[in-house]
Image: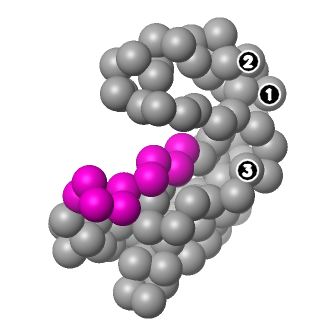
Amino acid sequence: MAARTLVLALAKIIRDQANLDELSVGVNVAKPRFSGTGASTAFTVYVPLEGKIDKKAEEDRTKKELEKSREQIVQAEKQLSNEEFRKRKPELAREIEEKLAALKVKLTELDAHLKELDS
């Protein structure tokens, strides 16, 4: 919720800097059709792109972000599969588990975005 509070506090600046007519902030906000998706582990941003961006470029960007997320998932899973690491650094292992869960959500969102672009 801290991210939501921050975005709401900065909404006017975000609208002005991004040249947006509208900015919606909320939980479970519906994704606009043909919109760019920026996903982090804390929140997801949707930017309507109809008529404003090259669809092929957005597909390429999303594929690149998907690949990066997959690589991060593999790395986190590899670290977590090391039982010695888990015993020596349990706090760090918990952080990596949380990051892994967030990465899997991000991967799902990006995959859905790519499928939407293909339709």
Q: Which residue is mark 1?
A: 1
Which residue occupies the foreground of this view, 46 or 93? 46
Which mark sits nearer the N-terminus, 3 or 1?
A: 1
CA gap, disc 2 to disc 1? Answer: 6 Å
Q: Residues within 10 Å of mark 2 (few under 14, many from 20)?
A: few
Q: From the viewer's perspective, is 30 left or right of 53?
A: right
Amino acid on which disc 1 is placed: Met
- Residue 12 in sight: yes
Dot 2 and dot 1 residues touching (CB under 8 Å): yes
Q: From the viewer's perspective, is 9 left or right of 50?
A: right
Q: Which residue is mark 2?
A: 5
The residue mark sitting in front, 3 or 2, is 3
Amino acid on which disc 2 is placed: Thr
Numbered label attached to residue 65: none
Q: Which residue is mark 3?
A: 29
Q: Residue furthest bottom?
A: 119
| Residue 68 is one of the magenta-drawn residues | no
In the image, what residue occupies the spot 60% across and 71% down?
108
Which residue occupies the foreground of this view, 96 or 81? 96
How far across and how far down the image is residue 8, in percent? 67, 18
